[in-house]
């Protein structure tokens, strides 16, 4: 039988790229039986809730989801739905791999996997304002939380993955020189974990700002990175930039009880509805999902076809300097997979 999985088309370019990915997976012989659910602004409009019960129930039941981007308005009353989903399902590990898919860009042979702690740090968003005189919002305060248990869990996940996949080195990224408690505890705990893996894999650590510079100067020195929530969010977009942009970067949110796969990018309102979005990031996320359920063979076939479509057929969307539409890319992939 097929594997039941929740499918959330999402907002902005979400429905366009989701449609393309579903068609491509069908051509591959998709093992998934999709349970389509509304989420994000689409759900807020029709159900009055961006994360409706039907959606949460579906993910709880299937423990597996492919999610299009969800719009979170800046400011306003909405808490990020992405953050809510991660918290609801305890998805503590966010894996964001990037590799060079289109040669001839700024960098060659990039193959970096970033693990981001997904539930703690500054993204707990324990925020409030303090009034001074007649200004009720004269001061903004935000507390970050890192726990030893949470730091150990993400570090173990990253080291375990790195060893299992034959990687050479794990770099722990932090800002322990300034945030001595918040990221000092993360560094200390991750180093403890690293010492247990000493015989199996090398490790080092970097301060986040220096790491950001090194990623531009000499990205090939990095292999696997493990870091806290905010730094991971920022560095993973930077990583996407090293390989051609957000259209190329998939992500997996993994916890003991569920896993949600998505693109790193957002709903791209500037190009939504034009049929020109790159569905590749979501397709690669579907590839990670296939690996997660033990279908490495299918994931490999996707990767092979992607290479042929991008570099032999030269079917590339605009973000990669090409002229292809979302549908052109899907058609080219389907042709190569059949
Ligand atoms: P964004 O990632 O949506 O867009 C940034 C830039 O990259 C835009 O110029 C966009 O056109 C381009 N881009 C993104 N994905 C692309 C694709 N597949 N193909 C071609 N070009 C692409 O980031 P932005 O504008 O900051 O956020 C828009 C909305 O998305 C916000 O509401 C934000 O909260 C939400 N968001 C949701 C995420 C999620 O659901 N996981 C992640 C990041 C942002
Ligand atoms: Mg982000």
Image (cartoon, rainbow, N blue to C red):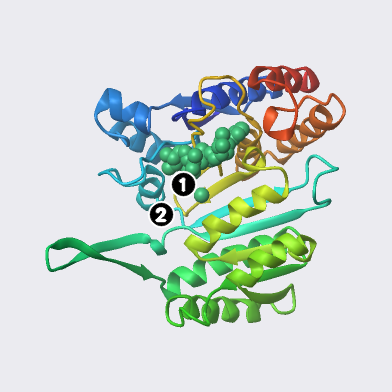
Please tell me how crowded label 2 is: few (under 14), some (14-19), or many (20+) other residues with Cα within 10 Å: some
Instruction: Answer yes or no: is residue 158 visible.
Output: yes
43 sits to left or right of 157: left
256 sits to left or right of 223: left
Q: In which quarter of the view is residue 31 placed?
A: top right
Label pair 2/1, CB-CB below 8 angstroms: yes
Residue nearest the observer in this picture, 32 or 16:
16
Mark seen at residue 47? none
N-term-proximal mark, 2 vs 1: 2
- Horizontal and vertical percent for residue 110? 78, 53
- Horizontal and vertical percent for residue 302? 74, 33
3 sits to left or right of 284: left
Residue nearest the observer in this picture, 117 or 296:
117
Residue nearest the observer in this picture, 139 or 41:
139
Q: In which quarter of the view is residue 263 placed?
A: top right
Please tell me how crowded label 1 is: few (under 14), some (14-19), or many (20+) other residues with Cα within 10 Å: some
At mark 2, the secondary structure is loop
Query: Circle 1 sits on which residue?
Result: 258
Is the C terminus in the top left, top right, bottom left or bottom right quadrant? top right
Residue 53, above or below 336 = below
Residue nearest the observer in this picture, 322 or 181:
322
Query: Circle 2 sits on which residue?
Result: 90
């Amino acid at each position: 039988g097929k594997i039941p999985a929740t499918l959330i088309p999402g907002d902005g370019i979400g429905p366009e790229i989701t449609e393309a990915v579903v068609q491509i997976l069908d051509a591959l012989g998709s093992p998934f039986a999709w349970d389509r659910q509304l989420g994000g602004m689409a759900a807020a409009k029709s159900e009055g809730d961006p994360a409706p019960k039907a959606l949460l129930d579906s993910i709880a039941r299937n423990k597996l989801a492919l999610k299009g981007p969800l719009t979170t308005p800046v400011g306003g009353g909405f808490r990020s739905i992405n953050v809510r989903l991660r918290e609801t399902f305890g998805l503590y590990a966010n894996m964001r791999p990037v590799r060079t898919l289109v040669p001839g860009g700024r960098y060659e042979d990039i193959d970096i996997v970033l693990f981001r702690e997904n539930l703690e740090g500054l993204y707990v968003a324990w925020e409030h304002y303090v009034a001074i005189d007649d200004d009720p919002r004269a001061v903004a305060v935000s507390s970050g939380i890192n726990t030893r248990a949470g730091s150990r869990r993400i570090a173990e996940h990253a080291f375990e993955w790195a060893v299992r996949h034959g990687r050479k080195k794990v770099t722990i990224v932090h800002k322990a020189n300034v945030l001595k408690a918040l990221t000092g505890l993360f560094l200390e705990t991750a180093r403890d974990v690293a010492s247990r893996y000493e015989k199996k894999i090398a490790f080092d650590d970097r301060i986040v700002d220096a790491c950001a510079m090194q990623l531009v100067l000499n990205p090939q020195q990095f292999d696997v990175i493990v870091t806290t929530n905010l730094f991971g969010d920022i560095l993973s977009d930077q990583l996407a930039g090293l390989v051609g942009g957000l259209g190329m970067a998939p992500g997996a949110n993994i916890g003991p009880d569920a896993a949600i796969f998505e693109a790193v990018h957002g709903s791209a309102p500037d190009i939504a509805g034009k049929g020109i979005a790159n569905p590749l990031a979501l397709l690669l996320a579907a590839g990670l999902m296939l690996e997660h359920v033990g279908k490495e063979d299918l994931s490999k076939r996707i990767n092979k076809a992607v290479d042929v479509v991008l570099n032999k057929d030269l079917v590339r969307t605009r973000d990669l300097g090409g002229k292809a539409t979302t549908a052109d890319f899907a058609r080219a992939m389907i042709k190569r997979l059949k």
